Image (tube, rainbow, N blue to C red):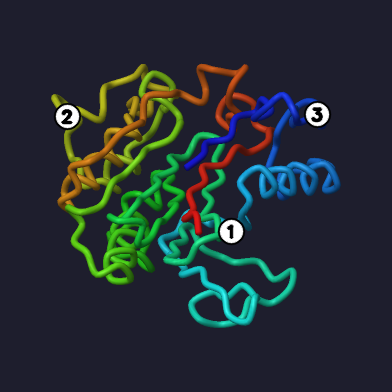
Amino acid sequence: MLMSTREPLGEAFDAHGSPPYDHFNLGDHVGDDPAVVWRHRQWLAEVCDAQPVWLQQVHGHRVVRLGREAGQLTIDGQFALPDAPIVADGSFTTEPGLICTAMVADCLPVLLAAPQGRGVAALHAGWRGLCGAGAEMAGQGVIEKGVEALCEACSCEPGDLMAWLGPCIGPQTFEVGADVLAGFGVSRADGHPAFREAPAVHGQSKWHADLAWLGRQRLHDLGIQQIDGGRWCTVSEPARFFSFRRDGVTGRQAACIWLVG
């Protein structure tokens, strides 16, 4: 398991990139120099001695299975097309050498591990993907989808899994409106552990939301008890983390998990 930051991961890496993407941006969709991003991704693969698989994340709940056949990458059992985006917000694998990744710059990355090295998963959970907002998700978020897929692939129960929550926007800085409360089925924020009232903006009620708490609660509700992490705020630590809410135009860090052969 590995969580990148905007700083290089080791002294052996000569960081590249210019503001606002310095130093170790892994996102190829944010306006950074493609050659620099490619170098960063190659360096990550070399350090991990495994193949990162990058997703085109869309704040949904699709979770894909990564595999290999005849030395080629497969997605849900089909050969991956060269340069074709993999549109999903989570991935899992039971095969060594493939890195499941979740790129973030305020959203919550969730890493899952099945017992005895049977499988791993990485999930990208913004508030929409977390609560399953939208008719196409019908209230089933990316965590539910990811846990179900990994447990089925590894023949285990949710309670057997371990989960780790990475850096995300913290409860002091994540200001939300009534749509977010409604997405999580909260009609009144009074006394709710994940929401507290914030000053109104242009007459509209606002709240501060605890994204990590909401993710942890979803995992608990599924029966997962072994949960760690979720203690870092991307907005509040500019020297360590990229943050879209703080900077607007910025890079992406990644949470990575893989099986060692």
CB within 8 Å, label 3 to label 1: no
For mark 3, give the secondary structure: loop
**Image position of 226 (left or right of 134):** left
Mark 2: which secondary structure?
A: loop
Q: Is residue 113 visible?
A: yes
What is the spatial separation of the Cα atoms under label 2 and label 3, in whole angstroms?
46 Å
Q: Nearer the viewer, residue 209 or 189?
A: 209
Mark closer to the chain start, 1 or 2: 1
Q: Nearer the viewer, mark 2 or mark 3?
A: 3
Q: Nearer the viewer, mark 3 or mark 1?
A: 3
**Mark 1: amino acid:** Leu
Residue 14 marker: 3
**Front-lying residue, 204 or 129:** 129
Quadrant assignment, res 196: top left
| Residue matched to label 1 | 55
User: Is the residue 57 above or below the residue 5 in the image?
Assistant: below
Q: Residue 122 carries which label?
A: none
Give coordinates of residue 166: x percent, y percent: 43, 35
Q: Residues within 10 Å of mark 2 (few under 14, many from 20)?
A: few
> Residue at the spot x=33%, y=71% of the render?
153
Tag 1, which secondary structure? loop
* Camera sees residue 133: no
Crowding at mark 1 (Cα within 10 Å: few <14, some 14-19, many 20+): some
Which is in the foreground here, disc 1 or disc 2?
1
Q: First in sequence, mark 3 or 1: give its number.
A: 3
User: Does 160 sit above or below residue 24?
Assistant: below
Residue 84: image location, x then y, percent: 69, 71
Kind of residue indicated by mark 2? His
**Residue that badge 2 annotates:** 192
Of residues 17 and 115, the one drawn nearer to the viewer in this rendering: 115
